[in-house]
Amino acid sequence: MSAIFDSILSEGFSVTMFLACLAAAGICGLVASFIMGKSGEASKGFLISLVVLPMVVCTVILMVNGSVGTGIAVAGAFSLVRFRSVAGKAKDISAIFLVMTAGLACAAGYVVIALLFTILVSLVILLLSQLSFGQKEMYELHITVPETLQFAGAFDDLFSRYTNRHKLIKTRTSNMGSLYKLSYDVELKDPTVTQAFLDELRCRNGNLEILITEKLEGADAL
């Protein structure tokens, strides 16, 4: 039984072994890509990258194969990628590390371990994405108030009634200074009473414009 967890490269390296490692890395990438597509929004380019990346990593590590000079050259080349990319979402970065680890395992010949690791971790990601694990109902609230309203503390009682927490993140003037536009981050206690919340806010701001939208996860949210 333990023999299936041994490296397939223990008996030497050949074209057949290279293709087997490459195929295993591709399968790991396909599994991770499929799960990431099911667990949330992901672009087509990102999903394709998850398939290709473990195959690239596998090939690079097989090329290095103990050569110190080649290893330093490869490390220098890959370090340039950092300056041509921006930080992604935390889940996306986790998926990238997942497929890179699978590619490294395939390069060492441990294809069964790589496949099991990819499947198990991908299922954990899918499960946690389907559950409300760490999920918070965060919204962006934009309120327009007249210049005659002292907005500092004007809505505190409504916030304490309808939200778990709130934070004023931006204030700006509008309409030649006759209006203020306030932007809040709020966590609603119950999203189903949003209309009642807005109705009470309208009574305070003179029935001026109010906008509430779901707060999207930023690209740098780690």
Image (spheres, rainbow, N blue to C red):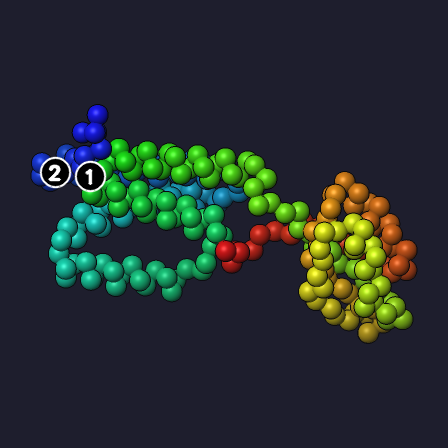
Disc 1 marks which residue? 109
Asked if 185 appears above or below 14 in the picture, the reply is below
Q: Which secondary structure lies at badge 1?
A: loop
Mark 1: few/some/many CA within 10 Å (<14, 14-19, 20+): many
Q: Is residue 23 visible?
A: no
Q: Amino acid at mark 2?
A: Ser
Q: Quadrant of residue 107?
A: top left
Disc 2 marks which residue? 10
Residue contact at pointers 2 and 1, CB within 8 angstroms: yes
**CA separation, marks 2 and 1?**
8 Å
Asked if 157 appears above or below 41 in the picture, the reply is below
Q: Which secondary structure lies at badge 2?
A: loop
Residue depicted at 41% across the width and 60% down the height: 85
| Nearer to us in this view, 162 or 200 | 162
Asked if 47 appears above or below 170 in the picture, the reply is above
Residue 205 horizontal/vertical position (percent) = 87, 60
On screen, residue 51 versus residue 1, left or right, reads: right
Residue depicted at 57% across the width and 45% down the height: 134
Residue depicted at 69% across the width and 57% down the height: 185
| Nearer to us in this view, 73 or 126 | 126
**Residue sitting farthest toward the bottom:** 176
Residue depicted at 74% across the width and 56% down the height: 141
Mark 2: few/some/many CA within 10 Å (<14, 14-19, 20+): few
Residue 75 horizontal/vertical position (percent) = 25, 60
Lower sequence index among marks 2 and 1: 2
Q: Is residue 134 visible?
A: yes
